[in-house]
Structure formats: structure tokens, C-alpha cells
Amino acid sequence: MLEVESGLVSQKEEFASKMETLAQRRVDLQRKEGSLKESLTKFDKFLKENDAKRARAIKKAFDEKKLRELKDHEIERLKEAVERLGRQRERQVRAVENNLIFQHYLESILETTDEFGEIKDVIARFDTLAATNAELVERARVAQEKNEAVRGEFARAAETKNTVILNHNNHLASLQRRLEDAQARSSMLQAALDEQARAAKGKSLLVGQIKMATTNLFSLVRAHLQNRIPPSSDTFDQLDKIAQFVVDLQVVIEVLARQKEREKGFAEGGTGEGEATVGVGVSAGPGGDAA
């Protein structure tokens, strides 16, 4: 039993020793881990600082390169400007040399006249005359533009007037054609009217002749009937009376014809009845009396 307890105590002490050793190792590991983390942090900071320095160095180099290029361009531009100014100076020198003749000319003018005291007076007079000439030229241009505007307006008015005249002429020609057509139709109508007038005149003459013949015939009928029918100036009434007389006369003629036939028969047969029959037929003549 003691051995067992001694063994357990020994095992506990050994386990405690191992646990202490493990704890110490854990502490050492934590310390090393902290040291590694600190070293890693420092290294990372170093890398970041190194990258920042490198980026700043690259940017500085790029800026210096760009600035150098700008300076080179500026140098080239200034060189070109110097060359251009040199050429301009040469041109101005040549212009001055060429214009010396004008200076000599102006000086000769001063020597020949007392109107101008200095060259600037001559130049001022020239400027005045040039301004006056420019004003006159401008006035002439304005007058020319007004003249052209008036001409254009006149041309447009003339064109409009010509168009109106042309339209009037066309309308007049149309009216002339209509007048000629109307005159032609009028001539045709006049000819037709004359023909109708001649026909009407002929018809009127025929009607007059008919009326005259009717009146004469009516007078003969009245005279034959011993004026037993009243007088009338109406042609149609006269024709009615004449027609009635003709009808009655036809009846009398037929009666007389039958009477002659009977008389002929009586002459052959020896009877006296025919005379009485003839007397009746004559009394039935026009007007109700014997013919």
C-alpha cells in the first residue's frame, strides 16, 4: 500500500514537474511568439517604409524626368523664339533701310515748303487725308450699296409690273377670244333669228291670207244664208260656221242626190212620191230654210 501511495506521489510529482515544464515551455513559446510578432511587425513596417521610399524615389525620378523634358521643350521653344526674333530683327533692319528713302523724301518736303515744321506734321497731314479718303470711300460704298438696293427694288418692281401687264394681256387676250366667240355665236344667233323672222313673216303672211280667205268665205256663207248667222271677227268662229255650213251643204247634196235617184225611179215606175221627199230634204239645209 505504501508502495502504491509512494508510486502515486512520485507520479504526481513527475506529472507536476512535466506540467511545470510544459507551462514554462508555453511561456517561452508565447514569449518567442511575441518576439516573432514584434519582429514581423517591425519587418512589415520596414517593408512599408522601404516601399514608400521606393515609391517616393520613383515619383521623384518621374517628376525630375518630366521637369527635365519640360525644360528641354522650354529650351527648344526659347531657341525657336530667339531665332524668330533674330529673323524679325533682320526684317526690321531691312525695312528700316528700305524706309530710309521715305525719311529722306519727307526731309526733302520740309526743305521745299514752309507749311510743315517737322516730319510728324507731314505724317499727321497724311493721316488726316487718309482718314478723309477712307471716309469718302466708305460713303461711296454706302452710296453704291443704296444705289444697288434701289436698282434691285426697281428691277423687282419692274418685274412685278411686267408680270401684272403680262397677266392683264393674257386676261385681255382671253376676253378678246371670248368676245370673238360671243360675236360668232351672236352672228349665228342673228342668222337664226333672221331665218326665224323670215319664216315668221312668211307664216304671218300665210296666216293673213288664211284669215282673209276665211273672212271672204264667211261673208259668202252669210250672204248665201241671207245673214241669218251673226257676224264674227274671230277666225276660229268663222271656220266653225263655215265647217257647219259645209256639213249642212253636204247633207243637202246627199239628199238631192237621193231625190234625183228617186225621181229617176218614179219616172220609170210612174209614182209621185219623190217630189214630197225632195221638199223635205231641201228644208233641212243650212239655217233650217230651203236652199
Image (spheres, rainbow, N blue to C red):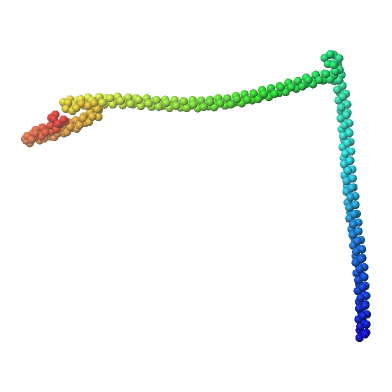
User: Which residue does the image show at 13% across and 30% down from the upper left?
Assistant: 289
Quadrant (top left/top right/bottom left/bottom right) for the C terminus:
top left
Q: Residue furthest bottom?
A: 1
**In the shown orientation, is residue 234 left or right of residue 99?**
left
Query: Residue 194: percent from the left, percent from the top?
Result: 37, 25
Task: Please name whichever residue, 21 or 282, is drawn nearer the observer in this view of the structure.
Answer: 21
Res. 268 visible in picture: no
Please tell me whether residue 2 is drawn above or below residue 140 in the rendered image.
below
Query: Residue 56: percent from the left, percent from the top?
Result: 89, 50
Res. 280 visible in picture: yes
Task: Please name whichever residue, 118 or 92, is drawn nearer the observer in this view of the structure.
Answer: 118
Please tell me whether residue 241 is drawn above or below residue 37 in the rendered image.
above
Please tell me whether residue 268 is drawn above or below residue 175 in the rendered image.
below
**In the shown orientation, is residue 21 left or right of residue 140?**
right
User: Which residue does the image show at 22% across and 24% down from the upper left?
Assistant: 216
Q: In which image quadrant can residue 223 be found?
A: top left
Q: In which image quadrant can residue 257 be found?
A: top left
User: Which residue does the image show at 90% across and 64% down from the upper left?
Assistant: 34
Q: In which image quadrant can residue 80 be found?
A: top right
Please tell me whether residue 230 is drawn above or below residue 66 in the rendered image.
above
Task: Please name whichever residue, 139 or 216, is drawn nearer the observer in this view of the structure.
Answer: 139
Query: Residue 24: percent from the left, percent from the top?
Result: 92, 70
**In the shown orientation, is residue 106 left or right of residue 285?**
right
